[in-house]
Image (cartoon, rainbow, N blue to C red):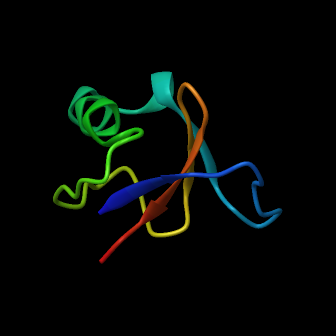
Amino acid sequence: MRLRRTGMVPSDARVRHYDELDEETQVTVRELAGRPQTAPEVDDLDDGDVVKFTDYYEVRAR
C-alpha cells in the first residue's frame, strides 16, 4: 500500500483518524506519510480510505 497526500476528500470515502488506528497501522502511516514508499497492506485500512494524520492521505492498495 501507499499513501498519497490529498487536498480533497471524496464524499463516499471512509475517513479514519490517526488516533483511531491500531499501533501497527499508526507506525505504517508514520513511515509512509509524505514519502514515495510502499508497505504491506494492513487490516485497518482499505483502498480508497482517507487517513487524517498531519494532512489527509488517501490509501492506495497495489
As drawn, 58 above or below 23: below
Specify whether 36 is left or right of 39: right
Work out which residue is located at the far bottom of the displayed protein and give it.
62
Q: Position of residue 25 (x, y in %)?
A: 29, 38
Residue at x 29% of width, y 55% of height: 43
Q: Across the whole image, how many numbered discs are drawn on residues?
A: 0
Given residues 56 and 46, the one toward you in this image is 56
Which residue is at 69% across, 62% downward? Answer: 13
Residue 60, above or below 39: below
Quadrant of the rendering where the C terminus is positioned: bottom left
Q: Taking 56 as reference, is 29 left or right? A: left
The answer to which of 36 and 11 lies nearer the viewer is 36
Outermost residue to the right: 11
**Quarter holding residue 33:** top left
Expressed as whole percent of the image width and height from the top left, the position of residue 23 reads: 25, 26
Residue visible at 35% across and 71% down? 61
Q: Quadrant of the N terminus?
A: bottom left
Residue drawn at point x = 61 percent, y = 33 percent:
55
Q: Nearer the viewer, residue 26 or 8?
A: 8
Nearest the eye: 62 or 24: 62
Instruction: Determine the residue located farthest toward the left in the rendered image.
Output: 40
List x then y, in percent, for residue 6. 64, 52
Quadrant of residue 2 within the rendered picture: bottom left
Return the x and y of residue 3 as percentages of the image width and height.
Answer: 42, 53
Q: Is residue 6 above or below residue 25?
A: below
